[in-house]
Image (cartoon, helix red, strand yellow):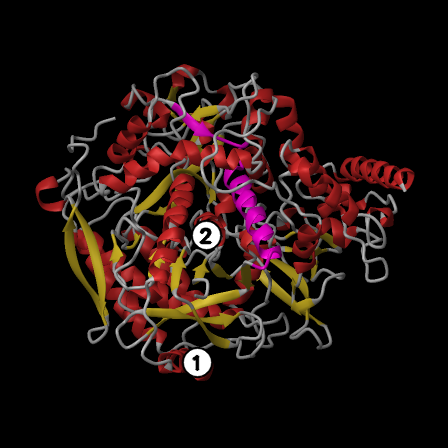
Amino acid sequence: MAAPKIIVVGGGLAGLAAVIKIAEMGGEVDLFSIVPVKRSHSVCAQGGINAAKNLKGEGDSTFKHFDDTIYGGDFLANQPPVKAMCDAAPGIIDLLDRMGVPFNRTPEGLLDFRRFGGTLYNRTAFAGATTGQQLLYALDEQVRRYESEGKVKKYEHWEFLSAVLDGTRTCRGICAMDLRSMEVRTFPADAIIVATGGCGAIFGKSTNSVVCTGSAQSALYQQGAYYANGEFIQVHPTCIPGEDKLRLMSESARGEGGRVWVPKTQGDKRDPKSIPQSDRWYFLEEWYPKYGNLVPRDVATRAIFKVVYEHNLGIDGKPMVYLDLTHIDRKTLDRKLEGILEIYEKFVGDDPRDTPMKIFPGMHYTMGGLWVDYKQATNVPGIFAAGEAEYQYHGANRLGANSLVSCIFGGFTAGPNAVQYAKSLQAAASNGHFDAERKRQQDINSRLMKADGTENPFLLWRELGAMMTENCTVIRYSKKCEETDGKLVDMLHRFDKINLSDRSQWANTTIAFTRQLYNMLQLSRVIAQGAAMRDESRGSHYKPDFPERDDKNWMKTTKATFAPDLDEPKFEFEPVDASLIPPRPRKY
Amino acid sequence: MANDKSVIIKIKRQPTPDAKASWEEFEIPYKPNMNVTSALMEIAAHPVTRSGKQTTPITYDANCLEEICGSCAMLINGRARMACSALLDNLEKPIKLEPFSKFPVVRDLSVDRSVLFENLKKVKAWVPVDGSYDLGPGPRVTMQEQEQSYPLSNCISCCCCMEACPQFNDDTGFVGAAAISQVRLFNTHPTGQALKRERLSALMGDGGIQECGYAQNCVEICPKEIPLTTSIAEVGGQVMKQALGDLLRK
């Protein structure tokens, strides 16, 4: 029997983790990525990766990691897979260590750990403040090794367009576009794994990379895959506002002792360093004495919003607060945080070792994603998903340093399960669906190339981003979410009147972007409608009109499915498996 | 003449790999803290040249926009650097953008840098682990060793060092500083050392480490400030030692 053929879409941590497992099991992999995989968005993760190795004598355990994760996610995640992830985490750290990740060390030569948000334990292993980069490189190197042995074939600068589904709606491969020649082609596979990250671009400016549009997930949702918990979007409390994006200022800055504050007096014009302690308001420490600056992200973000918009105490009257590291000695800062301090220095021009940083919350992480079962399988046979592209591990709010572990664990789970599935797969009745899918995608391209309307895709996107950020992030009102959905319908109509400023047939980034934009618009409706429907507050989803969590009615996974005839999402709700930790109120 | 509120950018454009390059000039509204990538986004939204001619958005590589993915390398005012961390305020005007000159142009500012990834295969830039299952912790590493390897591991594969190197060209086939520095990184790793011999062999002969002309451009241009010349010297010594040993054993 021929080796199982698996297509992995996306070459970040989750995708590469899956590739490694498949290659190791003797499977054949085609790996698709818009960018060379070494440039994937995982590279941006900064602070670290969680695993309860209990190397600091604190009595930490994988069960406490599990409990923190469930509690931090406000009891929305199904518990068994989260427990499995936390149990596997120490072994994953060991593996990364063996692969050569230059983790920071203790004087004895052991792995060093630091504290992150939503926990009281030092549980986060880290490589300076560029942990994601170092982890991605370690997996990239292993995949390159398999590539040189002929077990993996990379298709870099290719963009996934859709799955190829046969008459029984079973996945038989993918349709993709070469971003240089613009060729649209189909590729057969026994199973596919989608590891395409989050959907930050829907919100215009975010901490996400350019490729994080959610386009692949949206395309699959439009082909029949469930999209779960779309309304749960993490806004990271500490970002550096910028013209082109919001740059992340890692939670590790607070993990290493960084303090958030504003001047107590409105419009205090003094240099921050000359403001005495008595005139500073350390609001997180005052409001949350137990966790202080290390409350989870949703809590910190709402606190900053409250200080800026209700107390009107933003620095200089602007939406910004201080994140202060200046009390920590330079050597420690350089050893543990250099990467992120350099980012601030390079992009703002001030040295955060000398002067407090000015930060504000920004869209950061997509908790929702393709619905998967505990084997990482979507509801469409043959399609698996892993990493930020799926919804499984973080509930209503992700804890810092849990994303890297969920990516690798998800990939390690998806890979072997896809191989197992492939081994028992029956051959398709015919091959006609490949041509049909290719033609469908080529037709979309020709329509866009010919479209002679008035709408500029880049300007339409800016509008989308501003609207989604305003109405569907930190504070939500049902009416505004519904209005947003109405505007999204208008925008989908306007999309029919698109006009591409580039109609050439070579390396045309405009048409690739325009295709992504359409998928962003469709997925935005899932987010807006999901937010409108959920009448409670849970994790990142906060409605002033429904300020409490409502377990009786809403401890449920939102599942959106696309109704092609109506061109809109339909919703159903699935009870959460809370069989291991009984829900309790979330109070930090 | 551009006023305070706008910036002039000249961009070298080339529609296909075989086409002739030509220059286009843009005037974009100035905003404080703008970088080159945000200027390119602005042009994408309003693709009109300074003389009012409708044109196409610029093709360029970009992803993270925070100088960690290595995508957006190009020549900015003649210097190889990352477009995301190039702030307009700090650049001489008018600003000149060109694609790298030593890599095949794909289109406009986008070039094909796959040669580096091929070189990383040649030098086996990985730790040969037995497998991805749980085999317990890795080797102990002192803080000092970590502080040496971490900077080397920060290489973002942007290829600025290769673009700036006078020896990196078709005649020499020089492998370039980035790959050599990775050899140093993996040769220091307790498990990575297993492939040291093969790595050094890959750096011998034509296109190998001997092509280095000590111009030191690499270390001067590296956006991540990686000690590339130290790496070249160190690996050069290792290659020499191995070559000499091989000679004596013959």
Could you tell me how far apart the alpha carbons at marks 2 and 1 are, in whole angstroms? 35 Å
Q: Position of residue A48 (x, y in %)?
A: 46, 34
The residue identified by callout 2 is A25
**What is the chain letter for disc 2?**
A
- When the figure is inspected, residue A227 is found, relative to residue A441, above or below; the finding is above
| Numbered mark located on residue B212 in the image | none
Q: Do discs 2 and 1 share a chain? A: yes
Q: Residue drawn 60% across and 21% down?
A: A331
Residue A460 in the image: above or below residue B168 = below
Q: Residue A580 occupies which quadrant of the picture?
A: top left
Q: Are marks 2 and 1 in contact (CB under 8 Å)?
A: no
Q: Amino acid at mark 1?
A: Gln
Q: Secondary structure at mark 2?
A: loop
The residue tagged with tag 1: helix, strand or loop?
helix
Give the dominant element type of the magenta stretch: helix, strand or loop: helix
Question: Which of the two residues, B51 or B176, is positioned nearer the viewer here?
Answer: B176
Q: Whole-percent x and y of residue B7? A: 63, 58
Q: Is residue B247 left or right of residue B233?
A: right
Quadrant (top left/top right/bottom left/bottom right) for the N terminus of chain A: bottom left
Picture quarter with the C terminus of chain A: top left
Q: Residue at x 34, y 68 (%)?
A: A171
Identify the magenta region: A122-150
Residue A166 vs residue A104: left or right?
A: left
Count residues near mark 2 (Cα–Cα under 10 Å), then give few for <14, some for 14-19, many for 20+.
some
> What residue is shown with label 1?
A442
Nearer-the-camera pick, A409 or A106: A409
Q: Is residue A208 above or below residue A107?
A: below
Q: Is residue A146 magenta?
A: yes
Foreground mark, 2 or 1, reads 2
Q: Answer with the quarter of the image where residue A298 lies.
A: top left
